[in-house]
Image (cartoon, rainbow, N blue to C red):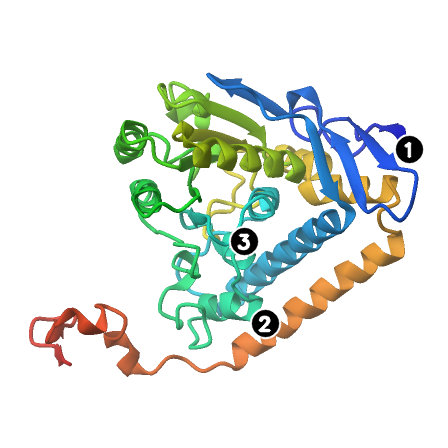
C-alpha cells in the first residue's frame, strides 16, 4: 500500500529553484524506494515533451547523492583554503553551489557515457572516478595529481571524462566529435558537453550544434547557466538568455539545476532521447556559483552580497536534499551529522596526502606530449635551442 504525504520546502527553497513537491512513500519499511513528484516548474521544454515529474529512486541513492554533494562542497572549501594559503597557484575555478549538476548527472549515467566540460571541473572529476587526493594534489602541482601535477585546476581527466578544458567553448565541438565516434562505433551511449552561459555565444558552439543535428549524433549540449559569465550578467551579454532554445533546430529543456533530482530526471531523459536515435538535445541547467568566477575574483563587484546570501539561504542544493531526507525519515539527524563529519575527515586526510606528495621530476616536462609510437624524434622547449630528443 502507498501512503501520500505532502511537504512544503518553502523554508529552504525559493520558487525559482527547489519548489514544493509531493512524495509517496511505501508503508513497509522493507521497501527501499521512494516516488517523488517534482513541482511542475522543474522543467520547461522547447520542441519536445518535458520529462515525467514522477521520480522513482531508492533511498540509498538519495543518501549517496547527499554524501557526494557534501564531500564535493568540502573538497572545494579545502581548495579555497589551499589557494588562500598560496599553496595553489595559477587558475582555480570552484563549483561551490553548483554541486547538484555534477551529482544529478552522474547518477543518471553509466560508465559508457562520456562527459566533457570547461575549467570548473573538480566536481565532475570526482564524480567520474577521480580520488579527492588526486584532485587536490593536481591543484597543488604534485606528482600524485590526477594529471601528474602538470595540468592544474583546468586539466583533469578520467577514462570516461575528457576534462577540464581551458579554452572558452572549445570543449563543445570536441564533445560533438566524441558523440560522432560513439555513433560510428555503434555504442549505445551519449556524450554530454558542458559549457557556461558565458561561452554560449562562441561561434564554435553553434558549429557543433549544426554538425550534431546534421548527423543526428547522440550529443547532449548542457549549458550551466550560473547567471554570470566571469563578471558579466547574462542579460548584458546575450540577446537571448533562453539558452535551451538556442539550438533552434535542436529541441531543448530548461532544468532547475539547484535540485539534484530534477537534474537526475532531465539527464536520464536526455540520454534516452539521444540513444534512441532522436538526435541531439540541449539542456540548460539554471544554477548559481557562490564564489567568484575564479579565486582571483571576489565575486562581489558585479552582484551584491545580499544576492549571494539569499541564494545560499534559500536555494542551496545540499540544504534542499537534506530537508527531503529528514522529512521523509530516510535518514536521522545523527546519521546526517556522521556523514558530514566523515566527509570532513576524508577531505582533511586527502589534503595532507596531497601535501606530502613531491613535485614532478623535471624530466616529466617531456612526457605525455605525443603518443609513444607517434615517431616524433624531438620536442622543442621554451627557446629554439632548447631541444629534447627521445
x then y, percent, for residue 152: 40, 63
Reading the chain from its start, which is encountered first: label 3 or label 1? 1
x then y, percent, for residue 185: 32, 48
Left or right of residue 369: residue 40: right
x then y, percent, for residue 82: 54, 66
Mark 1, residue position? 1
* Residue 302 visible within the image: no
Mark-to-mark CA distance, 2 and 1: 48 Å
Q: What residue appears at the point 26 percent right and 75 percent down from the top-left corner?
A: 367
Relative vertical location of residue 14 with respect to residue 263 in this rendering, above or below: above
Mark-to-mark CA distance, 3 and 1: 39 Å
| Front-most of residues 258 and 24 | 24
**Quadrant housing the N terminus:** top right
In the picture, the disc for residue 246 is none
Left or right of residue 87: residue 311: right
Residue mark closest to the camera, 2 vs 1: 1
**Residues at circles 3 and 2 in contact by the CB criterion of under 8 Å:** no
Residue extending farthest to the front is 186
In the rendered image, which quarter is residue 313 located in?
top right
Secondary structure at numbered mark 2: helix
Mark 3, residue position? 123
In the picture, the disc for residue 351 is 2
Left or right of residue 215: residue 91: right
Reading the chain from its start, which is encountered first: label 3 or label 2? 3
Amino acid at each position: 500500500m502507498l501512503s501520500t504525504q505532502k511537504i512544503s520546502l518553502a523554508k529552504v527553497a525559493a520558487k525559482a529553484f527547489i519548489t514544493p513537491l509531493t512524495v509517496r512513500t511505501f508503508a513497509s519499511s522493507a521497501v527501499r524506494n521512494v516516488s517523488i513528484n517534482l513541482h511542475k516548474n522543474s522543467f520547461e521544454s522547447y520542441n519536445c515533451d518535458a520529462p515525467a515529474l514522477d521520480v522513482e529512486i531508492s533511498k540509498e541513492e538519495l543518501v549517496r547523492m547527499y554524501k557526494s554533494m557534501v564531500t564535493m562542497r568540502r573538497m572545494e572549501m579545502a581548495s579555497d583554503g589551499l589557494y588562500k594559503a598560496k599553496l595553489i597557484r595559477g587558475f582555480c575555478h570552484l563549483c561551490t553551489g553548483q554541486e547538484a549538476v555534477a551529482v544529478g548527472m552522474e547518477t543518471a549515467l553509466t560508465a559508457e557515457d562520456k562527459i566533457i566540460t570547461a575549467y570548473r571541473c573538480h566536481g565532475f572529476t570526482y564524480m567520474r572516478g577521480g580520488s579527492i587526493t588526486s584532485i587536490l594534489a593536481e591543484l597543488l602541482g604534485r606528482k600524485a595529481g590526477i594529471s601528474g601535477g602538470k595540468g592544474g585546476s583546468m586539466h583533469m581527466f578520467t577514462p570516461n571524462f575528457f576534462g577540464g578544458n581551458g579554452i572558452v567553448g572549445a570543449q563543445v565541438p570536441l564533445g560533438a566529435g566524441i558523440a560522432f565516434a560513439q555513433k560510428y562505433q555503434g555504442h549505445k551511449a551519449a556524450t554530454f558537453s558542458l559549457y557556461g552561459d558565458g561561452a554560449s555565444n562562441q561561434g564554435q558552439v553553434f558549429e557543433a550544434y549544426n554538425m550534431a543535428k546534421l548527423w543526428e549524433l547522440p550529443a547532449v549540449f548542457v549549458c550551466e547557466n550560473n547567471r554570470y559569465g566571469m563578471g558579466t550578467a547574462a542579460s548584458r551579454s546575450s540577446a537571448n538568455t533562453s539558452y535551451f532554445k538556442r539550438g533552434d533546430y535542436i529541441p531543448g529543456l530548461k532544468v532547475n539545476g539547484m535540485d539534484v533530482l530534477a537534474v537526475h530526471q532531465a539527464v536520464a531523459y536526455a540520454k534516452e532521447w539521444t540513444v534512441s536515435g532522436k538526435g541531439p538535445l540541449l539542456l540548460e541547467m539554471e544554477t548559481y556559483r557562490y564564489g567568484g568566477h575564479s579565486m582571483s575574483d571576489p565575486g562581489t563587484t558585479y552582484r551584491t552580497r545580499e544576492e549571494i546570501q539569499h541564494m545560499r539561504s534559500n536555494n542551496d542544493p545540499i540544504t534542499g536534499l537534506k530537508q527531503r531526507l529528514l522529512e521523509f525519515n530516510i535518514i536521522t539527524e545523527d546519521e546526517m551529522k556522521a556523514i558530514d563529519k566523515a566527509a570532513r575527515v576524508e577531505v582533511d586526510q586527502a589534503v595532507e596526502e596531497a601535501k606530502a606528495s613531491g613535485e614532478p621530476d623535471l624530466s616529466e616536462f617531456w612526457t605525455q606530449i605525443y603518443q609513444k609510437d607517434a615517431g616524433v624524434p624531438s620536442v622543442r622547449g621554451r627557446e629554439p635551442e632548447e631541444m629534447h630528443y627521445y
